[in-house]
Image: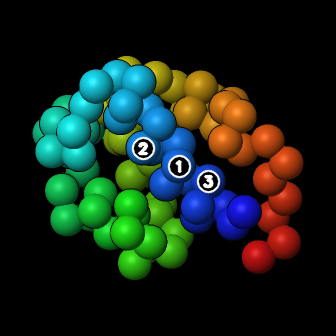
Amino acid sequence: MKAQDMLVERINNLCKEKRLSYYMLSYRSTVPLTTLMHIVDKSTANPGIITICKLCDGFGITVKEFFDAPEFDGLEMTE
């Protein structure tokens, strides 16, 4: 699985876990909804760390908590 797929899977799983719509995550994180949608539909191949940090704020978790998840097990940066 590609890193981009893992990222989208993690965002979707956290949205389900925290019962957040993309709209609410966008509002809470101050990441524009269009930006979030581009990440989720994979038209943005490499979202910046600032965007990831803002999404983490929206979820109420740290960046470490975001990446310390089963979705990223076995991730190797070969891309």
The answer to whether residue 49 is visible is no
32 to 26, vertically: above or below: below
Q: Foreground residue, 31 or 41?
A: 41
* Residue 40 image-quadrant placement: bottom left
Q: Give the Cα separation between the discs numbered 3 and 2.
A: 10 Å
Q: CA distance from mark 2 to mark 1?
A: 5 Å
* Closer-to-camera residue (2/53): 2
* Residue tagged 3: 6
Whether 56 is drawn above or below 48: the answer is above
Q: CA distance from mark 3 to mark 1?
A: 5 Å
Residue 63 position within the rendered picture, expressed as x and y whole percent measured from the top left: 55, 33
Q: Amino acid at mark 1?
A: Glu
Kindly state the secondary structure of the residue where label 2 is placed. Answer: helix
Q: What SS does tag 1 mark?
A: helix
The amino acid type of the residue labelled 2 equals Asn
Left or right placement of residue 17 versus residue 6 in this view: left
57 left or right of 3? Answer: left
